[in-house]
Amino acid sequence: MIVDLMAESWEDISQMNAEKLVVFLGIAPIEEHGRHLPIGVDIYETNHWIHKAAERLDSALPDYCFAILPTIPLGFADMGQFPGNIHVSRRLIFDVVYETTSAIARWDVHNIIIISAHADPLHAIAVEQACEKTNKEHGDICLAPMGAIFNLGPEDTSAAEPSELPAMQRNFPDDFHAGWIETSCMLSILPQYVKSDYMKRPNIVLQGREMTDGQKVAAAIAGEGHIGFPKLATASLGAELNNDMAEKIKTAVCCFVKREDFARYMKHPLHDILSSVPL
Ligand SMILES: [Zn+2]
């Protein structure tokens, strides 16, 4: 069963079988995504992935209830001075996730899944740190798998053959922000929100290590706001990407719910390095 948790009463929730309840919570920023995409991209993607993953989970684990909370519209989204961008601190992300998951833990929920389409490692790791703290206090009840999922290799792509995805991932990597990946996802989910001139946006290429140099990023994206190759986007690539993400989230949640081999979904590869930076 899949339920919209906001539409339930406290009494409804008290009658749910806590052992078989999985609560989904999204947290993603309102953030500029270039000239061609709306500032809500990460929230639209987060909601879509949660719902698609919940559908797959409902088929895989029919005796569970997948209860979806609204997505918190906050993120560490340090994309500079574009109108529409709302960047908040890692400290706030940590506090919001820690206090929210602690509150849910007091309902006696044993499975809280935090999802975000915002791939910034500093955002993902602040969420993971908050889950770590809640888990220290309540046992392992929180899983924030996106830091791990975003960093799975192409070999973990679930796409059915024939697929356009592996070649795109090989030939056009470093598509960090509002490039072919996010533009494709949006063409598949909400094409009416993608400006038709996305095909005219220039390629803006930065290597992974250049992404940590704020000045370099600001200079590269000035006047545009994206990093990558938006003109290569297609709705069919987006459908593949969204299906792949839903499948990966489903797999991670199945592992967590069964408490089997879930540790690999708990940490971004940079977690141990970046979590030592003060919030
Ligand atoms: Zn985004």
Image (tube, rainbow, N blue to C red):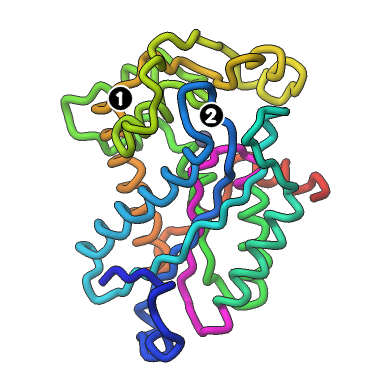
Nearer-N-terminus badge (1/2): 2
Q: Which residues are magenta?
A: 105-124
Within 10 Å of disc 2 (Cα), the crowding (few <14, some 14-19, many 20+) is many
Gap between marks 1 and 2, in whole Å? 22 Å
- Quarter holding the N terminus? bottom left
Q: Amino acid at mark 2?
A: His
Badge 2 marks a residue whose secondary structure is loop
* Ligand 1 closer than 8 Å to label 2 CB: yes
Number of labelled discs? 2
Residue bearing mark 2: 33
Left or right? Give the position of 72 relative to 4. right
- In the image, is residue 58 above or below residue 243? below
Give whichever of 14, 153 is nearer the camera.
Answer: 14
Residue at position x 39%, y 17% in the image: 170
Q: Amino acid at mark 1?
A: Leu
- In the image, is residue 10 above or below residue 186? below
Is residue 55 part of the magenta span, yes or no?
Answer: no
Give whichever of 141, 102 is nearer the camera.
Answer: 102
Residue 165 is tagged as 1
- Kindly give the residue lying farthest to the right in the view shown: 278
- In the image, is residue 62 above or below residue 263? below
